[in-house]
Image: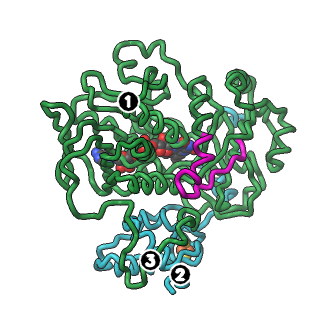
Amino acid sequence: MQGANEDEEDESRADVSGEIRLPATLEGRTGNVPEKAEIAIVGGGVIGLSIAYHLARRGLTDVVVLERGYLAEGASGRNGGGVRQQWSTEINIRLMQESVELCRRFAVDLGVNVWFRQGGYLFLARNAKETARLEKNIALQNRCGVHTRMLEPKAALDIVPELDLTGIVAASYNPSDGILFPWPFLWGYARQAAAHGVRIFTQTPVGGLEPQASGGYLVHTPRGAVRARRVINACGAWSPRLAELIGVQVPTWPIRHEICSSEPLKPFLRPMVSELSSGLYCSQSMRGEIVGGVSLPGHGSTYRMGSTLEFLATYARRLVRLMPVLGDIKILRQWAGPYDQSPDGNPILGAAPGHPDFFLACGFVGHGFMMAPIIGKLYAEWLTGGTPHEIFVRSPLARFADGSGAHHEKEDFNIG
Amino acid sequence: MAGKIVLCRCEDVTLSDLEHSVSRGYRDIEEVKRYTGFGTGPCQGKECLAVVALQLARITQQHPSAIPPFTSRPPLAPTPLKLLAKDPGAHRFADETDEGED
Ligand SMILES: Cc1cc2nc3c(=O)[nH]c(=O)nc-3n(C[C@H](O)[C@H](O)[C@H](O)COP(=O)(O)OP(=O)(O)OC[C@H]3O[C@@H](n4cnc5c(N)ncnc54)[C@H](O)[C@@H]3O)c2cc1C
Ligand code: FES
């Protein structure tokens, strides 16, 4: 998979003696964090890195990113790479239209190939209730200019001839949805952010946040403390823990989601295929692997990320039922990652109530990767003096505490 | 030269790919795996992990024992879906209760 860095072929590489001549994206493993920074972003997942990149692009380069482990350690290194505009709320549809545009330009803007491929998303319904759900969403998507359409089951065969249509009553299809390869996305953001002057520290957990009289925080790490005017909590499923350090309650919880990947096959599957009744989804990556998962009920709130045979068996059962020809393909590996589940399925953004210098960027459930391009851009615009986009007005933490959450729109089309 | 020395045959990752990864700062074995793709092929690193770890130790001037293997992922060997599908531990969804064993 040389695609992640193929653009760099012409640059000098480290020579055989191991001497390093390239500017590094990441800070070394030793040495302290800087004494101060305008903004400290905690969490080096796609959300934190996208914000860092966009801040730097807008000239705010006095930024540090502090990541507890290695880059891509959290959900951002473990997800399915699906990018869709088939959502149930207008704001999510519109945001995703913009995100898709940014994904299309990513290779050019960031100089890294993320293998974004718009093969569409095909949702399959097995009963009238699911069909009605798709129809309702499509009406809204069409009003927003997304060309999703309802298909007779037979028409789905034109898109994926391998489907067994037994029990399928309807399908929805939007050709401009797609998939991307998550890892290079992170390298791209990190590299460009660093090139603009952002300093990215891995293996640097934040263990304390000490409010300063003059505003901001002293952010404690094993590599020293950085005095930051503003702190952004981009810790994904671990966000409640970081917020707790200053007594802020973030009402999200970690849910383990498993996923697996097959041996590579010749390209045959264009869209992401997803079945509503089981939360089954699968797509073929640009490397030829079938990557997918299925919903398993009730593992509750957990940070344990082990893999189970129950998952593989359930996924296999559902996938072979839907596409019998896949029976002979082999699964190479399975893994798991956390959804940062929020009560209404939507993210939590903006300053925490009573803590004007502590910003949240969490609660992205199962769609934080596809949202990251547009959220990072809008967040950076706002933090550099722009007027806040509507999403920030709609997504404050306070919606849960002050009861306004009762009127808050739920996103109910989280699949998988 | 380093561009011709293949460390991971499944994914065609060379010594110079590894050096490149390290020069960017991606030097944790997990990061190297993701940055270069080594160890993600059909053998899942069984044939290349030790070689890559050894070269990584050399380039980063660490003792090889300081480099832990990356997390190995189940299943132990490539397993066909139709075999897994027969496992009795599979969860049954509401839409398949009437189908019985098949
Ligand atoms: C199996 C699976 C499939 C998915 N499929 C899709 C999909 O198809 N499409 C999609 O858009 N999304 C998908 N998602 C969701 C998506 O991966 C996440 O929403 C997104 O990656 C969240 O990014 P993040 O940066 O908020 O979190 P993360 O990537 O988890 O990053 C948070 C980082 O914070 C670090 N951290 C935590 N605590 C501290 C601390 N105290 N100090 C320093 N660092 C800390 C963690 O190590 C971690 O690296 C999927 C998720 C899973 C698990
Ligand atoms: S040789 Fe590296 S994965 Fe097989």
- Taking the view exactly as shown, the residue that stands out farthest to the left is A213
Residue to which mark 1 is pinned: A385
- Taking the view exactly as shown, the residue that stands out farthest to the bottom is B1
Q: Is residue A324 left or right of residue A371?
A: right
Q: Is residue A356 above or below residue A415?
A: above
Residue to which mark 3 is pinned: B52
Mark 1 → mark 3, Cα distance in angstroms? 47 Å
Q: Is residue A258 above or below residue A391?
A: below
Task: Kindly state the secondary structure of the residue where label 3 is placed.
Answer: helix
Q: Residues within 10 Å of mark 2 (few under 14, many from 20)?
A: some
Specify the subunit that label 1 lies on.
A
Mark 3 → mark 2, Cα distance in angstroms? 14 Å
Residue A35 percent location from the top left of the image? 18, 49
In front of the other: B8 or A200: A200
Image quadrant where residue A101 sits: top right
Residue to which mark 2 is pinned: B3
**Ligand 2 lies under 8 Å from the Cβ of mark 3:** yes
